[in-house]
Image (tube, rainbow, N blue to C red):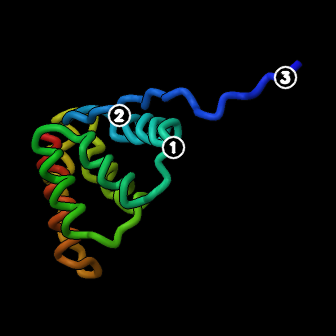
Amino acid sequence: MQPILKPTTKLPSKKLQYPTYVKDTDPDAHIKVFKKVIKANGEVVEANVINLFGFTLRDNIFEWGKNYIQDHPNYTFEKLKQTFCKWFKTLKNDEEVYMQLQNIQQQTTKRVEVYYECLLRLANCL
């Protein structure tokens, strides 16, 4: 009687579909789902994770991601995630945005780039 042999090949596993992010949705929730899918799909190479993340973005946010990734080739996924959440976290309503825009001013201790990014982030919420 011959022993039962274990199969030598794995059955092909189906990769999970990556989530898509569209404007005015929660960036933290998108990151959370994206990280779960990355883990489930076995992606471990950071450069691949960063590129895959860029393809989960839609419309003008895709352009933002493409430009950001090209302009910051040495950034980690962690840094990309922080910047993405900072840029696309929406405020609760237009009134809150208008209030913040009225009160925005460049502080003498901050660089003009920081002021400009804050201004763009607020304008993106409208």
Residue 18: give x, y in percent of width and height: 35, 34
| Front tag of 1 and 3 | 3
Classify 5 as above or below 46: above
- Earlier in the chain: of badge 1 and badge 3, it is 3
Residue 52: give x, y in percent of width and height: 32, 47
- Spot the residue most to the front: 1
Name the disc covering residue 42, or none. Answer: 1
Classify 107 as above or below 92: below
Q: CA distance from mark 1 to mark 2?
A: 13 Å
Q: CA distance from mark 2 to mark 3?
A: 45 Å
Residue at the location (89% across, 18% down)?
Answer: 1
Would you name the residue on which mark 2 appears?
18
Give the class, few, some or many, for how many residues have Cα within 10 Å of label 3's Cα (few <14, many ≥20).
few
Residue at the location (26% across, 69% down)?
Answer: 72
Q: Quadrant of residue 95?
A: top left
Residue 93: give x, y in percent of width and height: 22, 33
- Amino acid type shown at disc 3: Gln
Disc 1 on helix, strand or loop?
A: loop
Would you say the residues marked 1 and 2 are in contact, meaning their CB atoms lie under 8 Å apart? no
